[in-house]
Amino acid sequence: MNIPLFRQDLISWFEKEQRDLPWRKDKNPYKVWVSEIMLQQTRVDTVIPFFNRFMEWFPTLEELAEADEEKVLKAWEGLGYYSRVRNLQSAVREVAAEYNGVVPDTLEAISKLKGVGPYTAGAILSIAYGKPEPAVDGNVMRVLSRILLIEEDIAKPRTRKTFEEAVRRLIDETHTSSFNQALMELGAMICTPGTPACLLCPVREHCEAFAEGVQSRLPVKNQQKKTRDVPIAAAVISNSRNEILIRKRPSKGLLANLWEFPNYEVHASVATKRESFRQQFQEQLQVIPQLGEHLISIDHTFSHLVWKMEVFLGKAEEVSENIMNSHQMKWVAESEVEGYAFPVSHQKIWKAYQLLKSQSTNQR
DNA sequence: CAGACGTGGTC
DNA sequence: TGACCAAGTCT
């Protein structure tokens, strides 16, 4: 390959054709950082409104550092992979305290920050600081697997190093930001999975896979993880003051620190989900709930599992303060429920509840 | 290393 | 409709 010509063709195309995205208006390291975290495993179209609102709520690194975690999680509600934003705030606080609020510009320092892995480190260093570091994501591996006809399995963690070496060889050290972003932009716009738009590609003359006509079978990617079903019984429980019972999830694991309606995993030996809920609720809170009608069934698919939820209506009273606290539970007015950050599956529960309520009101 | 970790869009 | 995907990181 003619590397200088490849660089020129790639970068010229990017400078001319790049999308107008909110995080490309300037190279503020904080904004670049936030955008890169949001973009992890997440589409550009999804990220745009989240990014804009996040910058309204937390315009500077200092404001994010000083914000309540509750508000930060609310800003991330619906984006997924919530540990990203908890790690981000933790890292931002680290930068505020240890680096005088300036995002570090060395690979060693920036890589120590929570949530900043090899890709994000390279992306921030190259985009915000012009450092010639590789930023190898799924796009870059797909694009370069075709251009260089590399048949290593990109699902294997070790393979990333192969592509980092390739980028170090190819990168234009005077235009690191455009070079790295161009590789990703090309992967998103032209060199797509499946059937790439090679006739529109600015670097097809440099592409070995195109020359061989094998672009559609690259990259090689072996991985198929199955999901397992998790049966769950949940309920929207209200008290005589029309307050709703919610609880905060544990600080580690799935959907950490988000809020939810009380629910329990149901075991196969239990006859019905309603009975299972009643038993587990009573055992945990020392109160017998009055379970009413079935509200909604929700199947919610995660990356690695599926919640098969049956949701009921219910009423309860007099849960002791001690028990409430030990289970991170609280009663909240209906008008305040939406101030808490819920996973999407539980947002659906709340919408179903409100719909039912508005219908029963209209009937009168 | 393999699996956990979310969600919404696409073919 | 059910994979498979999308600018990864942590354990």
Image: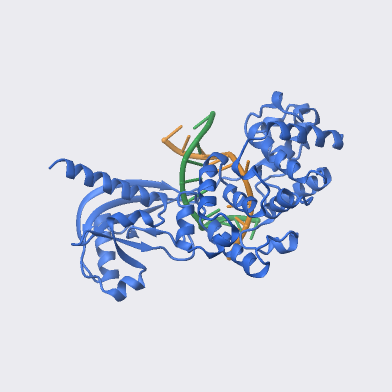
Chain colours: A blue, B green, C orange
The C terminus of chain A appears in which quarter of the rendering? top left
- State which quarter of the image contains the N terminus of chain A: top right
Q: A153 left or right of A207? A: left
Residue A320 location, quadrant: bottom left
Count of marks placed on residues: 0
Q: Which residue occupies the foreground of this view, A105 or A40?
A: A105
Whole-percent x, y for residue A110 in the image: 70, 61
Q: Residue A45 location in percent, x, y? A: 54, 39
Q: Is residue A46 above or below residue A240?
A: above
Judge whether A287 appears above or below A175 on screen.
Answer: below
Pick the front one: A340 or A143:
A340
Between A233 and A82, the residue placed more toward the observer is: A82
Q: Residue at x 79, y 32 (%)?
A: A9
Q: Residue furthest bottom?
A: A322
Residue A236: image quadrant is bottom left
Rendered residue at 27%/47% (across/down): A354
Name the residue located 68 percent from the left edge and 45 percent from the top edge.
A154
List x then y, in percent, for residue A231: 36, 53
Q: Is residue A348 left or right of residue A72?
A: left
